[in-house]
Amino acid sequence: MKIAFTYWQDGSDWLGHLDEFPDYVTQGASLDDLKAHLADLQRDLTSGEIPSVRHHAELELAVA
């Protein structure tokens, strides 16, 4: 399973979010550590453990 994510480095910290859930940012000490935190976050967000999760999606519209 592949999940898209966005990340950036701020000083010595690596920050990122899952593209489907841009409101939930996490951090790690390295890129690998960040990926581990993102995997945990994905599990938590999709398990129902966190209430009222906001989702990001795309809407396809027909061109008239």
Image (cartoon, rainbow, N blue to C red):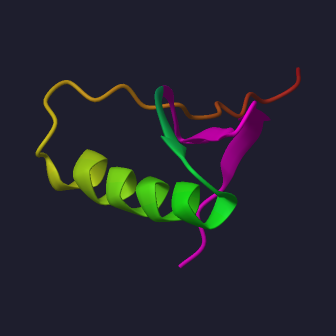
| Residue 39 vertical position relative to residue 21 in the rendered view, above or below | below
Image position, residue 44 (x, y; %) = 24, 51
- Which residue is depicted at the point 53% across and 41% down? 20
| Residue 44 vertical position relative to residue 23 in the rendered view, above or below | below
Count numbered badges in the picture.
0
Span shown in magenta = 1-23
Nearer to us in this view, 44 or 16: 16
Q: Is residue 22 magenta?
A: yes
- Which residue is depicted at the point 71% across and 42% down? 7
Main SS category, magenta section:
strand
Q: Is residue 5 magenta?
A: yes
- Which residue is depicted at the point 28% across and 29% down? 53
Image position, residue 22 (x, y; %) = 55, 29
User: Which quarter of the figure is the C terminus placed in?
Assistant: top right
Image position, residue 47 (x, y; %) = 18, 55
Q: Quadrant of residue 54?
A: top left
Residue 5 falls left or right of residue 18: right
Residue 4 falls left or right of residue 43: right
- Which residue is depicted at the point 35% across and 50% down? 41
Q: Which residue in the rendered view is the most extreme toward the right?
A: 64
Image position, residue 13 (x, y; %) = 64, 38
Q: Which residue in the rendered view is the most extreme toward the bottom?
A: 1
